[in-house]
Amino acid sequence: MSKNNSEAGVEETLRSVLIITCSSCSVIGACVIIASFLLVRSVRTASRCIVVIMAIADIMVALPALMSEIIFVTNNKSLETVELCKIQSFFTTVGAQVSMIWTAGLAQHMFILVACRKEAVRGGFIILSMMTAGVIAENVYLYCVNILGGSQIVGIKWCWINIKNDPVCHCKTNCNWMLWDGKVLEMAMYLAVFVYYFLLYTKVKHLKNRNDLASSSLVTAIAKTGKIVAIPFVFILVRLWGTLVTLWLIKTGCQRPTSTLFDTLLILMSFFDMSQGWVNFILYFLTTGHEINLTNRLKLVVRSLPYMAKTRRTHCSENSYMTFNESGGRRSSLTVGNTVSSSK
């Protein structure tokens, strides 16, 4: 059943509002996570470093999509006819996959930390970095061969795979790249995150009974708030709708269905795909106690600003001033004490 123009306009407006709102919240939440890592020394652990990498990846997803949607809303056109579409597609695709890789890596890291009682940082970071490099290399190739860049099929104004019409077979080409460039990895990460958090839950429960929980602040905070059970389900919930839309499109040969259910999935994908940043902000920062450390740090900085300004003025007025050397014309610094002794 086809929709009239008013219904299509309402759905498009709703998707735009959801994308702009959720993208903005994700960028803000990710920036707060990064700022806390830079300002608060006590949170500079290996686990928090992984969360920061996830936050950077979430910005790579949300910020380009936000810019694309704003350009579409203000100019009433998408980016698919310009080079900027390929650039946006590259950053959002890489960011989404890197975020999933390091989310699974965080689960693995915390399980090893609890199970082995040591920071298994080096080996885990090398493996995750190699997977990240592989994702970047794959998408650089897709960028160079013009497979990235296009939003003709999905119906959402950020770009992804460039779907083309083949005049020979009268079919869509590049459709399977929607599966290989992200969704296979995504489904593998579903399984990895679920398994590692299940193992972490059983191990933490065993250690808590013996009052022997590992001394990782992030693991302790997650265990105390009961989020070990919630995190894998939230991880899947946030990304599931995009997976369902992609699988549906691949099944139909990238011919967009005219189903109400498909349009509903698009709206859910618009909301959840851009929500990864603020969801991670809630899971790994807002309820772990470190928001208090960041708040105290920011208060300390604000309170010290008048003292810093006063110290700078005193230093400039009492320590030194600049003058020119008569013989060479070069600028030299003379302190007040040196000036007095010279006059004598």
Image (spheres, rainbow, N blue to C red):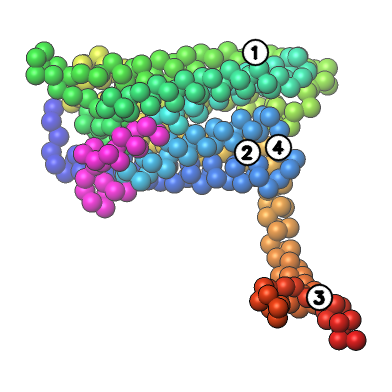
Q: Is residue 334 left or right of residue 110?
A: right
According to the picture, the residue beneath numbered tag 1 turns out to be 199
Assign the magenta stretch its main secondary structure: helix
**What residue do we see at 65% from left, 33% from top?**
48
Kindly identify the amino acid type of the residue bearing the numbered disc 3: Thr
Q: Secondary structure at mark 3?
A: strand
User: Which labelled disc corresponds to residue 44?
Assistant: 4
According to the picture, the residue beneath numbered tag 3 turns out to be 335
**What residue do we see at 62% from left, 22% from top?**
125
**Disc 4 and disc 3: Cα gap in Å?**
41 Å
Which residues, given as a range, are shown in magenta? 70-92
Mark 2 or mark 1, which is nearer the start of the sequence? 1
Mark 2 or mark 4, which is nearer the start of the sequence? 4
**What residue do we see at 54% from left, 19% from top?**
130
Residue 224 seen by the camera: no
**What residue do we see at 72% from left, 73% from top?**
332
Mark 4 or mark 1, which is nearer the start of the sequence? 4
**Disc 3 and disc 2: Cα gap in Å?**
49 Å
Residue 330 found in image quarter: bottom right
